[in-house]
Amino acid sequence: MEYSKLVAVTGLPGLFELISSKTDGAIVRSLEDKTTRFVSSRVHNFSHLESIEIYTVQDNVNLVEVLKAMDSAGVKLPDEKDAAAIKKYFEKVYPDMDFERVYASDMKKMVKWLSQLQKNKVELKLSEVPEEEEAEEVAAPEETPVVEEAPKKKTTRKKKAE
């Protein structure tokens, strides 16, 4: 399972692996109980974990950086229901976090998500664009192909008899 395929779905607890996307929703698999289901995009929003950023006192950082700091801290994860213990935990593990703009509910989610990622042995890393593709995009602007238009057909209208 890859970190880049994981999503959070509004209104549903936990994390999900994105299996397939469709125009009206997505097929996802829960990391908790491994059930697969269709989730409608009319009712729910999807957030890729790679795109989530956390407020800090300096620049915003990607969620994966906070999760890595939590994982490498060597401190036991606090109870998800104890907001004060969670805040103290983050003050030790990631003191640069902006605690005025990051809500307690968000910190609870991060604790829960990290425990799910550890149980499923997901490697915490962002997907990277290969360097060759980045260089090509920057180096050569795309040329627009010349397309010749086909001659237009003349249409005639028949008059109705009165």
Image (tube, rainbow, N blue to C red):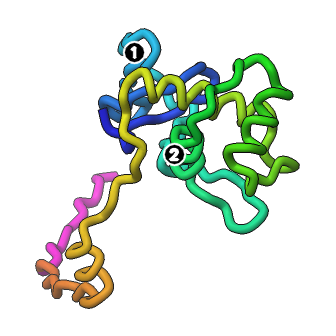
Q: Is residue 132 above or below residue 68?
A: below
Residue occupying image coordinates x 38% and y 11%: 35
Magenta-colored span: 151-162
Q: Is residue 38 magenta?
A: no
The CA span between labels 1 and 2 is 29 Å
- Return the x and y of residue 40 as percentages of the image width and height: 49, 25
- Return the x and y of residue 7 as percentages of the image width and height: 47, 35
Q: Quadrant of the N terminus?
A: top left
Q: Nearer the viewer, residue 120 or 148?
A: 120
Q: Which residue is mark 2?
A: 68
Which element carries disc 1, helix, strand or loop?
Answer: strand
Q: Nearer the viewer, residue 123 or 3?
A: 123
72 horizontally vs 139: left or right: right
132 horizontally vs 83: left or right: left
43 horizontally vs 31: left or right: right
Q: Is residue 36 above or below residue 149?
A: above
- Specify whether residue 42 is in view: no
Q: Nearer the viewer, residue 155 or 139?
A: 139
Q: Which residue is mark 1?
A: 37
Q: Residue furthest front?
A: 74
3 horizontally vs 15: left or right: left
Q: Looking at the magenta stretch, what is its main secondary structure?
A: loop
Residue occupying image coordinates x 49% and y 23%: 116
- Return the x and y of residue 61 as percentages of the image width and height: 61, 58
Residue occupying image coordinates x 55% and y 22%: 14
Residue occupying image coordinates x 19% and y 68%: 155
- Specify whether residue 96 is in view: yes
- Of tags 1 and 2, which is closer to the observer? 2
Q: Amino acid at mark 1?
A: Arg
Q: Is residue 65 above or below residue 88?
A: below
